Amino acid sequence: MNPLLSKAESGGYLTRADLVELLALPKDDPDFQALLDIADRVRERTMGDGVYLRGIIEFSNICRVDCHYCGIRRSNKTLQRYRMPVDVIVDTAKRAEGLGYGSVVLQSGEGDALPPDELAEAVRRIKAETGLAVTLSVGERTKEEYAYWKQAGADRYLLRHETSDPELFARLRPGRTLAQRLQCLQWLRETGYQVGSGFMVGLPGQSLASLAGDIDLLRELHVEMAGIGPFIPGPETPLAGEAGGTVEMALKCVALTRICIPDAHLPATTALGSIHPMGRQLALNAGANIIMPNVTPASYRENYQLYPNKICLLEEPEHCAPCVAGLIASQGRYVATGQGHSPRVG
Ligand code: 5AD
Ligand code: FES
């Protein structure tokens, strides 16, 4: 057995070099499964067997950025751009609550998907009219906007750093820099959100050292949540034709993140479920403890494909809820109730 596994098991500090060595484990090496099993035990000890459900509401696909990896990038002209009215957002949140979800994530493209005061209004109404926790995922914004929405009642914010490699970042997100993104993450901390970040696995030009840097960055940011999924190349993007991330590499990244940040909430991502029929189940057994079912009304979904072959494209939320519950039960786990805040905030 690789001695780094005993270090991981006993809670020892994994250096970047250690992370690289573990990320290099081939999938047919028994140590590969041993690594995932260690993460599973860490998850069980720190977070228990409950799996929290966060309903995602993709309220607008309007975006000012032209990320090379993303299916709703500004220059994709094949999409119908939409913006859900505040009433529809609030009704969708109520629908999510009716399905037993304890929190919703309001996600959109970056930029003027919805005027800031309308988004604040949606947050205020959801907080007043439901018992849901509210997470925002609307990209790089000003500190004032972050503070404004926090005051409106938002609890958490998701802003994946995407890749910790500054050159790769700048290449894939034209006009934006990693430094700006990290500044936003810092502002989110300062304004009092529970902060989520994360990255894509298998971007073209991404090395193992760079992935180790991604995990290390999450540890440094001491995130409350981290979304980690494979990159999936999309047809209407400059990266069409590139190879995507693999299930195995994504699982190793989830597992190592669980080992490095034992008390973080880690979703079994939709992207993992989209490249492998058991992707989310495998992640639940490699450190993940969250599922984020899509609750966007079906009529909007086809215009919010960040990547192709996204699961549940034509499903209404009422269809996904029992499916996800079954998936969780099939892994010997249970659906956790309540808002599912970070254990750090109690
Ligand atoms: N493949 C996988 N994940 C993607 N995302 C965007 N485009 C893709 C893709 N092609 C992820 C990004 C973003 C999150 C909302 O979706 O990490 O932060
Ligand atoms: Fe949507 Fe399974 S999660 S159908």
Image (cartoon, rainbow, N blue to C red):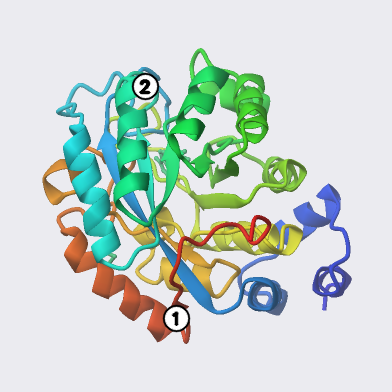
The residue sitting at 43% across, 67% down in the picture is 280
> Percent from the top left, x then y, of residue 307?
33, 42
- Residue 89 seen by the camera: yes
158 vs 224: above or below: above
- Residue 142 seen by the camera: no
Q: Quadrant of the N terminus?
A: bottom right
> Percent from the top left, x then y, of residue 261?
72, 58
The residue sitting at 51% across, 62% down in the picture is 340
> Percent from the top left, x then y, of residue 7?
87, 69
Query: What is the crowding at mark 1: few (fewer than 14 residues within 10 Å), some, or many (at least 20)?
Result: some
The residue sitting at 45% across, 47% down in the picture is 244
For disc 1, does the CB lie below 8 Å from ligand 2? Answer: no
> Percent from the top left, x then y, of residue 187?
63, 27
Q: Quadrant of residue 47?
A: bottom right
Using the numbered discs, state the Cα–Cα distance from disc 2 to disc 1 in whole angstroms.
37 Å
- Amino acid at dot 2: Pro
Image side of residue 62 versus residue 223, left or right: left
Q: Going by the picture, which residue comes out furthest to the front?
A: 128
What residue did someone put label 2 on? 116
Question: Which labelled disc corresponds to residue 334?
Answer: 1
Image side of residue 309 versus residue 257, left or right: left
174 vs 125: above or below: above
